[in-house]
Image (cartoon, rainbow, N blue to C red):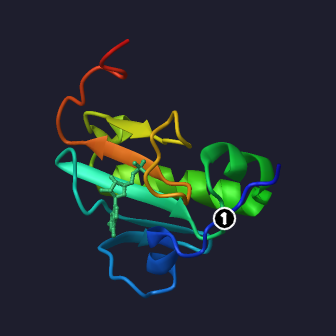
Amino acid sequence: MPYAYDTSNIFARILRGEIPNKTVLETAHTLAFHDIAPKAPAHVLVIPKGPYVTYDHFCAEASDAEIVDFARACAQVCEMLGLSAADGGKGSRAITNAGEHGVQEVPHFHLHILGGRVIGRMIENA
Ligand code: 5GP
């Protein structure tokens, strides 16, 4: 079954400029902005501008240009937030939730980049 993208989701509305956001970085194919309810001192969401529902959808169907742009934007966000270990930062956690079992709230693919404190174990009940 093909992925069904809901154009009324909140991140689609942000991309259309209908809802404000605190932009960290915008590139040709990618937008990064602060999470409205941060779970860490640094909590940025990185999203592709294209209509992809989940990480696997993006990886399967996005163009090479979109994928490269997204990956480079993630690196740039880590650097801008001072999280990049390569620049003396203390690191970060990147998370993406997908679907029901991943407990995804917004059905537009997004990568959470969290940092500024020790984030804790990857999965608490593991
Ligand atoms: P998910 O559970 O889908 O992985 O994460 C969705 C994230 O989007 C949550 O961390 C939530 O705080 C964030 N979020 C939901 N609505 C908005 C919004 O209108 N603006 C911003 N900046 N973040 C939002």
How many numbered circles are shown?
1
Q: Residues within 10 Å of mark 1 (few under 14, many from 20)?
A: some
Against 37, is 8 above or below? below
Which residue corresponds to mark 1?
5
Picture coordinates of residue 32, whole percent (x, y): 42, 64
**Callout 1 secondary element:** loop
Q: Residue 35 at x, y = what percent?
A: 30, 59
Callout 1 amino acid: Tyr
Residue drawn 20% across the image and 44% down it: 40
* Left/right of residue 58 with respect to residue 108 in the rendered view: right
Q: In which quarter of the image is residue 53?
A: bottom right
Along the line of sight, the residue nearer the viewer: 118 or 80:
118
Asked whether, in this view, residue 100 is left or right of residue 115, the answer is right
Q: Which of 112 and 103 is in front in this view?
A: 103
Name the side, left or right, on which 8 lies relative to 55.
left
Residue at 83%, 49% (x, y): give it: 1
Residue at 65 percent across and 60 percent down: it is: 52
